[in-house]
Structures are given as structure tokens and as C-alpha cells.
Image (cartoon, grey):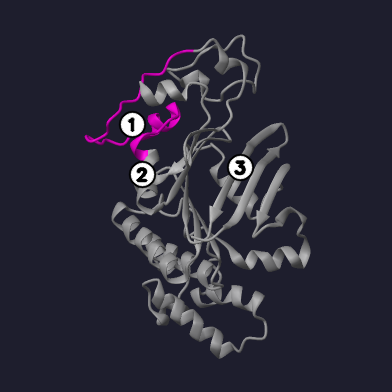
Amino acid sequence: MSAALLSVRDLRVRFGDVEAVKGVSLDLNGGETLGLVGESGSGKSTLARAILRLVPVSAGELLWRGEDMRACVGSELRRRRRDLQIVFQDPLASLDPRMSVGEILAEPLRIFEPRQAAAERRGLVGEMLERVGLSADMAARHPHEFSGGQCQRIGIARAMMLRPALLICDEPVSSLDVSVQGQIVNLLGDLQREFGMSMLFISHNLAVVRHVSHRVAVIFRGRLVETADRDTLFAAPAHPYTRALLAAVPDPKRPWTAAEPSVVEEAVVPPGSGCPYRDRCAYAAPACRESVPALEAVAPGHRAACHRWREVVYS
């Protein structure tokens, strides 16, 4: 893996009075997959859209190959977006029903390669359809003629037409049948190995994240609460929230158990103060009501935002 392609520093996203992303910092290296997990409403998709500049960033740094993405506007931002593509959760809703599959896949080429010959464009579209497990003669069909899994393959093909350096996958298999999920995950892995791209893989499906990721970041109520390499996080999580997530996945080999949640006195806690997980945490203490824990080093490459992570790890 090469040096960091993407660096996010203290990133914040606010919608009116609601802060959806609260000071997130992370790095994504060349050729790696970073899994981003958390429950619905935790800020996963908002963070992804902020990285792509699809929603406004309130504060923080967003560096792409060391250069400030927040300073990019107009044609410069458009040029950089060639390297950053996204695969959405709902495969059918993300495809224009009025366009044929060939037109959908050709659109990125028309935008970024306007001088490209039409015949060459059609050839590239056919090649990419074949690469994602479809056939070139399907280019004349429309999205409603395909199954959900096929539509997701089309969405992936569209994202790959420009050979991006970073592919953001926002819950790409959550709406698909279990039998199809594995096929799509394997396809993404094959494309990553073939093209050498990085991936930010967003999901609440921990089994999928474990299969595809090199490192994992856990987010709760807009804050990162734990980051580690995949094997470390699944074997020895240091944050109570991560343990609670993993406890929902049956595993007879797991060497630890999740503690039962306790109740913390919320009446005296000012809104927005303290640890965001304190009201559901069995390890909650007075300090958890008073200050937001910073991400501390548990071990090399492993950090957790918990005042009592030592008790969590060694209990």
C-alpha cells in the first residue's frame, strides 16, 4: 500500500441545528479498503457525501493526495471528481429510467472525454459490461428490465468507467438478496485487485465488512469511536459500542462477551456533552457525562474513544 490518498481531519457537517458529522479524522491509503460501520443514522452516508463534496462541509480539512479539496471549485472540483466515484445503496433508484444502459455507462465518458469517438465509447461500454458479469448486447436495454443485482452491477460499471482511484460503496449490498450479496462483494474485490483502487466500504453488515476490509472504522452519532485493522477489531474490540455491534453476530469462537447496558443519569447531562454512547454503556462513569473521550492509542494502529477502554479490554 502507498501513502494516504485521502486524509480527513476534524471534519464536521451541520444541517441547521443538527451536527451530523462531529470531528471525524481518518486516512485511506492507496489500494486498501476501509470499512465504515455503524447503525442507521450514525452519519456514515453523510460522511461519504461530504468527502465527495455532495454536501457542504462545515469545518475541517479534506485532503486528496495532499491537496485541499475544500478549496476546489468549478472546473477544478469537477476534474478531481473523476478520481472519486460512488456506488449507491439502491441500485434501481440510482439509474435514470429514461436512459438505456449504454447511455448510462457512456455518460461519464461524454463528460470527461468529450473528444472520444462514439465507436470507441461504445466499445468501452461493452467491455465494462462484460467485466461486471453482464453482456455487451444488454447496452440497449433500460434499467427496469434488470434485476436488483444486475442493476447494481450496472451501477458499479458506471462508477468504474473512469478508472477511479477511490470508489465509495455506500451500503452496496444491503438491498440485495443474500445469494446476490456475495457475488457483488466478490466483484468489487476483483475490480479492486485489477485496477488497484482504494475503497471506502460503508455497511452495517459486519460479515461483509470483515470479508472486504483491511481496516475498519466504527462511527456512532457522528463520531468515530474505534479504528483498527480488521483482525484486531473483530478479535479484541476496545469500545463498548463495537462490542455491542459484534455481539449481534453469533460467533462461538469469540473470546469475549458484551456487557449488559446500564442506565446513566441523563437529567443532569447538558445536550451534546459527554460520551455519545454513555446512555447505553455498561461501563459508563461520571467522567463519561463530563467530557467527550478522544481517540486514544490502544495498540499500534488501534484507537478507541472511551474513557474506560482499559477496563473493556482487560475485563
| Residue 220 sits above or below residue 175 on the image | above
Would residue 235 be seen by someone viewing this image from the given angle? yes
Q: Of residues 195 and 172, which is closer to you in this image?
A: 195
Residue positioned 39% across, 66% down in the render: 150
Residue positioned 43% across, 26% down in the render: 240
State the SS at label 3.
strand
In primary-sequence order, the first of circles 3 and 2 is 3
State the SS at label 2.
helix
Q: In which quarter of the view is residue 83 placed?
A: bottom right
Q: Residues within 10 Å of mark 2 (few under 14, many from 20)?
A: some
Mark seen at residue 25: 3
Q: Which residues are magenta?
A: 234-263
User: What amino acid type should be assigned to the residue bearing mark 3?
Assistant: Ser
User: What amino acid type should be assigned to the residue bearing mark 1?
Assistant: Ala
Please state if 246 lies on the left or on the right of 106 as rendered. Answer: left
Tell us which disc is closer to us: 3 or 1: 3
Quarter of the image that includes the C terminus: top left
Dominant SS of magenta comes to loop
User: What amino acid type should be assigned to the residue bearing mark 2?
Assistant: Asp
Mark seen at residue 299: none
Residue under numbered circle 1: 247
In primary-sequence order, the first of circles 3 and 1 is 3
Spot occupied by residue 244 in the image (x, y as percentages of width and height): 39, 29
State the SS at label 1.
helix
Please state if 34 lies on the left or on the right of 55 as rendered. Answer: left
Q: Of residues 31 and 47, which is closer to you in this image?
A: 31
Whole-number angstrom distance, CA of label 3 to CA of label 2: 21 Å
Please state if 170 lies on the left or on the right of 181 as rendered. Answer: right
Residue under numbered circle 2: 231
Whole-number angstrom distance, CA of label 2 to CA of label 1: 16 Å
